[in-house]
């Protein structure tokens, strides 16, 4: 469960500005697994409203979908009723640090924009992240594939037009995101190798809504990115007043264009793909 975003509150409208961004990267990674993709059991760790499960269930044998937030899990169940009845997906109300799955029971794992919600950070030596990677290694079959979808510090600094406008929240959320070097070290210490990184430059987290100049004024729009939950009310009021003034001067869209320019070369998402060692340390 997130340590800063109230997903029970946001679950009803989360999908309005979010989609299964980068799902092709996940599909391609699973295609390179030893087991044919259509025969694979896939763990969706932190499945949320089921955006990624809804796409991947078309390609794999079965999905084990896990989330600690009951509201998000209910949203996922509602959109995958037929697949659940057909035995193509099972839902589990559980944390990802203690999965309700047997040892070596899944062929692949995907975890999408979830790790930064762990009660963790650099000051705690990423202990919760370590526990999650250890649990992933337990349930994953040898040579199985792990796909981690996250945002790097560099992408947070330059890949979102509105992040520089909320600097206090940006620094807080960066402290929640593990750096690539630390993530790779945790993966290797828990028996993963063949580590690869991919950045789909064309993927935008909120789709066309990301470019909506009126988005920050809409609470529903803001619920599409958990960083807004870290913005203090006073800071939000100042920002909205600033943006409204630019809008009245017909300068808001130009600001967005200028702030968004770096994203085109750096992206918003980074996928880390790893394989479980055949022989565990």
Image (cartoon, helix red, strand yellow):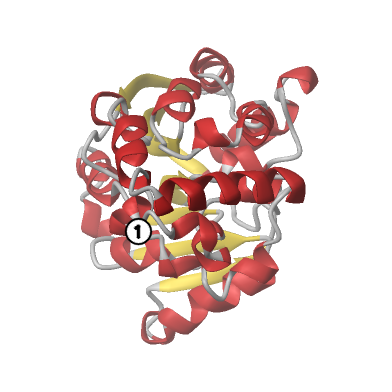
Residue sitting nearer the eye, 216 or 181: 216
The relative height of residue 166 versus residue 65 in the rendered view (above or below) is: above
Quadrant in which the C terminus appears: top right
Where 271 sits versus 191, above or below? below
Residue 3 rendering spot, x and y as whole percentages: 75, 47
Q: Secondary structure at mark 1?
A: helix
- Depth check: 275 or 160 in front? 160
Q: Residue at x 67, y 26 (%)?
A: 175
Q: Quadrant of residue 278?
A: top left
Q: How many residues crowd around disc 1 within 10 Å: few (fewer than 14), some, or many (20 or more)?
A: some
Instruction: Give residue 224's position: percent from left, percent from top.
Output: 50, 58
Name the residue rendered at 44%, 45% in the picture. 246
Q: Is residue 134 above or below residue 227?
A: above
Whether residue 278 appears in this view of the structure is no
Name which quarter of the figure residue 48 lies in.
bottom right
Locate residue 91: give its quadrant.
Answer: bottom right
Coordinates of residue 90 in the picture (x, y in percent) = 50, 72
In this rendered view, identify the residue nearer to me: 241 or 180. Answer: 241
Number of numbered markers: 1
Going 56% across and 76% down the picture, which residue do you hit? 12
Question: Where is residue 200 shown, x and y percent of the image?
Answer: 25, 35
As displayed, is residue 157 above or below residue 182? below
206 on left or right of 98: left
Q: Quadrant of the N terminus?
A: bottom right
Residue 246 visible in the shown view: yes
Q: Is residue 114 left or right of residue 15?
A: right
- For label 1, the residue is 209
């Amino acid at each position: 469960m997130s340590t800063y975003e109230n997903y029970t509150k946001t679950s009803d409208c989360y999908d309005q500005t979010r989609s299964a961004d980068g799902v092709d990267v996940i599909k391609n990674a699973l295609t390179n697994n030893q087991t044919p993709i259509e025969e694979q059991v896939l763990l969706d760790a932190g499945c949320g409203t089921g955006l990624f499960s809804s796409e991947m269930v078309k390609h794999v044998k079965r999905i084990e979908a896990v989330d600690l937030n009951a509201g998000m899990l209910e949203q996922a169940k509602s959109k995958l009723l037929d697949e659940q009845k057909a035995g193509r997906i099972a839902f589990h109300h559980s944390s990802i640090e203690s999965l309700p799955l047997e040892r070596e029971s899944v062929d692949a794992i995907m975890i999408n924009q979830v790790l930064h919600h762990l009660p963790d950070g650099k000051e705690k030596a990423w202990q919760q992240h370590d526990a999650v990677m250890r649990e992933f290694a337990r349930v994953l079959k040898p040579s199985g594939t792990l796909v981690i979808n996250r945002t790097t510090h560099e992408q947070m600094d330059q890949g979102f037009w509105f992040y520089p406008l909320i600097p206090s929240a940006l620094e807080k959320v960066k402290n929640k995101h593990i750096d690539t070097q630390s993530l790779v070290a945790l993966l290797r210490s828990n028996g993963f190798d063949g580590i690869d990184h991919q950045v789909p430059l064309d993927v935008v987290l909120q789709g066309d809504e990301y470019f909506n100049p009126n988005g920050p004024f809409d609470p529903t729009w803001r619920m599409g990115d958990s960083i807004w939950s870290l913005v203090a009310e006073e800071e939000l009021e100042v920002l909205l007043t600033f943006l409204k003034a630019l809008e009245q001067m017909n300068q808001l869209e130009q600001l967005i264009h200028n702030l968004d320019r770096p994203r085109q070369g750096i992206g918003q998402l980074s996928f880390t793909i790893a394989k479980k060692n055949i022989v565990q340390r």
